[in-house]
Image: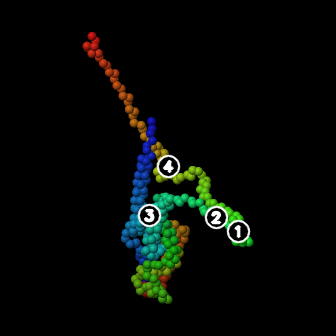
Amino acid sequence: VQRVQPFGAIADQIVFREQALERGRNERFAAMVERQSRFVFRVAYALLRNAEDSEDAVQDTFLKLYRSGAWERMDDERGFLARTAWRVAIDRARRLKTVSSDAEALCACPNPESAAIEKDRHATVRRLVDTLPEELRQPLALSTVDDLTSREIAAILGIPEGTVRTRLSRARTLLREKLIALGVQMR
Amino acid sequence: MNERELEKLIDEALANYVPDPRSGIAERVLARADHRGHKVVLAGALAAAVLLMVMLMPKRPHAPAPIQVAVDVPKHAPSVDRPPQLHRARLVRRTASPPKREIFPTPAPLSDEARLLVALVRKSPEQAERLLTFEEPEPIKPLVIEEIEITPLEGEAE
C-alpha cells in the first residue's frame, strides 16, 4: 500500500534543495569573479584606456554573464570572458563617444612626439602607441594582456588570426619608425 | 640606439601599457552586483505591492447613469399661456457588461510549489516518485484475546 506524502513537505524539500543549489552557484560565480576580474579589466582597458570606465565594463560583463547564465556553460572561460568584456567595452565606448585616456594627452603643439620625449622613454613609447590607428593599436594592446595569443586576439576582435599577426607586425614597425624619428632625443 | 635596444624598449614599455586594476576589484564588483540585485528585488516588491493594492481596492458599484432628457425646442415659441411641451424624450441608460472571456474558466498560472514539483517530475521522475510515496508501515496484527475459562465454583457443583 502506498500513501502520498503531504504536498507541503515535498515542496519544502524541493525549495531547500533549490536554495542549496543557488548558494553553491553564487559561490562558484564569486570565485570566478575573484579569479578573472583583473583579466577582464585589462581586456576592457585595452579598448577604453580609462580605469574608471574599464571597471564599469568589468561590472557590466559579470552582471551580463550572471543574468544570462552563460557563465555556467563556458568551455573556454578566458576566451569567453575576453570576448564578452570586449563587446561590453565597445558598447561603452560607443555611449561615451570620446575615449578619455588616463595617459597624459599629447600636447597640441605642431609636433606632439617631440614634446612627449621630455618624459621618460617608456611613457613616450606608450604615448606613441596611443597615436597608432585603432586597427593596429587594439591588437597590440591586447597582445600585452596576460599573454593573449594571436588566436585569442583574433577571436576577441572577430578577425582572422593571420590578420592579427599582420597588424601586430605593422604596429611594431610603425612604432619603431616613430621612435627612430625621435632617435636623437632618445639617446 | 640599435635595433635590439629599440625592440627591448618597446617590449618593456608595452609590458605596462595596460595597467592592473586598483586592488579589491573583485570585492567591488561583487558588492555592486549585490547592491543592484537588492535594487531589483526592492523594485519588484514595490511593483507587487502596488499591483496588490490595485487588485484589493474596493470597486465602486456602477451607479446608473442619470436619465438624460433631450428637449427639442420648437421652432416657433409657444404662446405664453400654453405650458411648454416635451416633444421627445430619450432615455439613455448605461449598463456595464463584464468583458467576455475567451476561455472559461480563465487558466491560472501554476503556483511556485506546483512549478517546482513539475520541474522535479520532469527532471527525475524516479526521485519524484520516491519523494511522493513511501511504504506503508507493517500492518498492526489483530489483537487476539484468549478465551476465558471459568471454572465452576465448588459449592455450585453441589
Question: Which disc, if any, is residue B118?
Answer: 4
Q: Position of residue B52 (x, y in %)?
A: 48, 59
Q: Secondary structure at mark 2?
A: loop
In the image, what residue type sits under mark 1? Answer: Arg
Q: Which residue is mark 2?
A: B68
Mark found first going from the N terminus, 2 or 1: 2
What residue did someone put label 1 on? B82
Residue beneath label 3, please? Answer: B42
- The span from disc 2 to disc 1 (Cα, nearest Å) is 24 Å
Tell me if mark 1 has few (under 14), some (14-19) or many (20+) residues whose alpha carbon lies within 10 angstroms of its own.
few
What is the x, y in percent for residue A182?
Answer: 46, 85
How many C-alpha atoms fall within 10 Å of the one at disc 4: few (<14), some, or many (≥20)? some
Chain hosting mark 2 = B
Say few, some or many: other residues with alpha carbon within 10 Å of mark 2 (under 14 / 14 to 19 / 20 or more).
few
Question: What whole-number distance in Å separates the C-alpha atoms at marks 4 and 1?
Answer: 81 Å
Q: Earlier in the sequence, mark 2 or mark 4?
A: 2
The kind of residue tagged 4 is: Val
The amino acid pointed to by label 3 is Leu
Query: Which residue is rendered at x = 39% and y = 68% of the image?
Result: B28
Chain letter belonging to callout 4: B
